[in-house]
């Protein structure tokens, strides 16, 4: 089977390669040392360079974390809006939060899931075997980001549940969801619709709030199940499974009652003084009709209970799928995402510097990118789409790279250490001012 036609893969798409480097920092250092292209003195310098680079990046990302928390204050659903007043420019603050959050996720090697990808995912066979409805139109903004993926084989029912067949589905390793509720300042009609929808779905989030949710191991076709206020709706199979027995069981009772209902009305009229006399046979038929009505009522109640029971089963399946895959929510995910962004950024810069350092001459951008990806595949066993432009921008900013005549070279280790030391001392000096 061609890679572009695997189940769970977007039509016409080639093999997806993730940018994430799924290794610890110590693993990167260990692989570099084990490769043996640095002598003992340079290994010591390289370890020190890695520590100083990590300290500088940690300081920089600490500022990013503070900016995220500061901006999110106005949109945290746990914060009473009266605490920050109405004079704030919330539209500008919302745009800033959007930009900052997307920037951090990009540094952590997340990719935003496009609207087209979400739409096509909704049409796929999902791990959650229920039909659901997500009221996306009730929100100001909904954004999804993913990182890493793998394929799993699940079993789905076939032939009305009599058989099961395997299905290969794409599963995202990490998914981050950002949902913004509509602010209070909207049209009256929009407000009425949003309030009506919120009541139906039991929404208890204040208007204008922004929700963040972090999930692990979500099947691509289950993305819809992550939306807020998602509702389980009965499918055609559910209606047929529950409705057909109800019709088949109820029709005989109704037919039997049709012939005795007149007698029941006659007896009722006699006791209400509206008719003359009745016979013993009429009384027996009336009791039979009354028993039939009670039986019909009990049957209808049982079928209604079956409908609700099926809904609860579906809702539990949906809840279990989301609950056990939810990692963190709202401001609680900031620290984790900042740490992931810092970690991925550090690995990219260090690998880019190392691959330039161990080359005999200058490299072009394209060759450098290919060498890094080849090193990752050969020495680490990771097939990654390396973000060479971001890494080179970082090396340029720290002064660890020399550019001449279209070629790229690494600054020698002693000079690189000296430059990073000056950068670190400058940061510490600025912090004490």
Image (tube, rainbow, N blue to C red):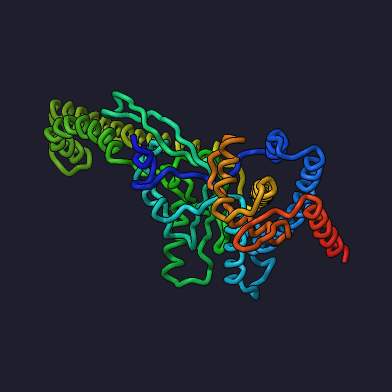
When the figure is inspected, residue 119 is found, relative to residue 37, above or below; the finding is below
Residue 389 left/right relative to 354: left
Residue 418 left/right relative to 378: right
Q: Position of residue 341 (x, y in %)?
A: 65, 51
Is residue 238 visible in this depiction of the protein? yes
Identified at 80% across, 55% down, the residue is: 415
Identified at 65% across, 46% down, the residue is: 355
Outermost residue on the bottom side: it is 87
Where, quadrant-wise, is the C terminus in this rendering? bottom right
Query: Picture quarter containing residue 249?
Result: top left
The total number of labels drawn is 0
Identified at 30% across, 27% down, the residue is: 161
Residue 251 left/right relative to 375: left
Where, quadrant-wise, is the N terminus in this rendering? top left
Outermost residue on the top side: it is 162
When the figure is inspected, residue 377 is found, relative to residue 348, above or below; the finding is above
Q: Position of residue 226 (x, y in %)?
A: 48, 46
Q: Position of residue 289 (x, y in %)?
A: 19, 31
Is residue 323 visible in this depiction of the protein? no
Q: Position of residue 223 (x, y in %)?
A: 45, 46
Identified at 38% across, 28% down, the residue is: 155
């Amino acid at each position: 089977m061609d890679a572009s036609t695997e189940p769970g893969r977007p039509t016409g798409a080639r093999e997806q390669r993730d940018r994430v480097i799924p290794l610890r920092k110590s693993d990167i250092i260990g692989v570099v040392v084990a490769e043996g292209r640095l002598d003992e003195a340079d290994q010591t310098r390289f370890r020190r360079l890695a520590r100083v680079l990590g300290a500088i990046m940690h300081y920089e990302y600490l500022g990013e974390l503070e900016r995220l928390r500061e901006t999110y204050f106005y949109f945290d659903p746990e914060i009473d809006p009266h605490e920050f007043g109405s004079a704030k420019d919330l539209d500008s603050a919302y745009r800033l939060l959007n930009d900052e959050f997307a920037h951090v996720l990009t540094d952590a090697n997340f990719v935003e899931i496009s609207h087209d990808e979400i739409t096509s995912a909704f049409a796929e066979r999902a791990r959650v075997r229920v039909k659901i409805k997500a009221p996306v139109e009730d929100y100001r903004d909904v954004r999804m980001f993913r990182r890493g993926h793998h394929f799993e084989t699940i079993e789905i029912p076939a032939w009305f549940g009599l058989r099961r067949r395997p299905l290969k589905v794409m599963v995202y390793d990490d998914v981050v969801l950002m949902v913004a509720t509509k602010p209070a300042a909207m049209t009256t009609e929009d407000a009425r619709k949003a309030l009506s929808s919120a009541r139906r779905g039991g929404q208890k989030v204040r208007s204008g709030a922004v929700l963040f949710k972090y999930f692990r191991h979500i099947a691509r076709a289950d993305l819809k199940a992550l939306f807020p206020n998602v509702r389980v709706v009965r499918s055609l199979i559910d209606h047929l499974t529950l409705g057909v027995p109800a019709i088949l069981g109820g029709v005989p009772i109704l037919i039997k009652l049709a012939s005795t209902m007149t007698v029941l009305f006659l007896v009722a009229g006699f006791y209400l003084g509206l008719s003359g006399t009745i016979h013993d046979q009429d009384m027996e038929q009336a009791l039979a009709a009354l028993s039939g009505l009670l039986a019909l009522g009990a049957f209808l109640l049982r079928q209604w209970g079956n409908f609700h029971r099926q809904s609860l089963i579906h809702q539990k399946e949906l809840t279990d799928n989301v609950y056990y895959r939810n990692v963190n929510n709202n401001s609680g995910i900031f620290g984790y995402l900042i740490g992931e962004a810092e970690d991925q950024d550090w690995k990219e810069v260090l690998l880019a510097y190392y691959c330039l350092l161990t080359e005999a001459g200058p490299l072009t951008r394209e060759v450098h990118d290919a060498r890094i990806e080849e090193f990752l595949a050969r020495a680490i066993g990771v097939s990654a789409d390396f973000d060479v432009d971001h890494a080179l921008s970082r090396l340029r900013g720290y002064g660890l790279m020399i550019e001449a005549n279209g070629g790229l070279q690494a600054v020698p280790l002693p000079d690189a250490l000296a430059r990073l030391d000056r950068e670190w001392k400058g940061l510490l000096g600025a912090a004490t001012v």
